[in-house]
Image: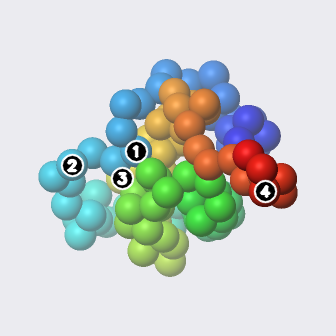
């Protein structure tokens, strides 16, 4: 996860306490600012992989972000950054899989 945070330059950000803000309306288009030039699609893909493997706590927020891959707005980028900020503050959480059946 540290490599993922470094890839998107989110390794030194202020941590967030939750992966998403409750009560936000994702249907708004932030004044019609569409077509943001950013690695949004790649970041969402990386977060989807992470949420499926070891971080189910971010699944809902990543699902909401994945709905905006085609028409990304400034608001969507801010929400995606919040997920990374949450990961920054919760690096010690997640599942650990072991091949040893005795543990």
Q: Secondary structure at mark 3?
A: helix
C-alpha gap between disc 1 and disc 2: 10 Å
Residue tagged 2:
22
Q: Residue furthest left?
A: 23
Q: Residue at x 46, y 53 (%)?
A: 58
Choose mark 4 or mark 2, whichever is in front: 4
Where's the N terminus, which quadrant?
top right
C-alpha gap between disc 4 and disc 3: 45 Å
Residue tagged 3:
75
Q: Secondary structure at mark 2?
A: loop
Task: Tell me if I can see residue 29 in this picture.
Answer: yes
Q: Cβ–Cβ below 8 Å for labels 3 and 2?
A: no
C-alpha gap between disc 4 and disc 1: 33 Å
* Within-10-Å neighbours for mark 1: few <14, some 14–19, many 20+: many
Choose mark 1 or mark 3, whichever is in front: 1
- On residue 19, which mark appears? 1
Q: Earlier in the sequence, mark 4 or mark 1?
A: 1
């Amino acid at each position: 996860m540290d490599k993922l945070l470094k890839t998107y330059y989110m390794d030194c950000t202020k941590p967030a306490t939750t992966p998403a803000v409750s009560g936000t309306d994702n249907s708004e288009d932030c004044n019609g600012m569409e077509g943001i030039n950013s690695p949004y699609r790649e970041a969402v893909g990386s977060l989807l992989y992470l949420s499926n493997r070891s971080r189910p706590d971010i699944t809902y927020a990543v699902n909401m972000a994945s709905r905006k891959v085609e028409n990304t707005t400034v608001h969507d980028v801010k929400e995606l950054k919040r997920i990374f900020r949450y990961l920054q503050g919760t690096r010690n959480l997640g599942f650990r899989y072991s091949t040893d059946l005795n543990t």
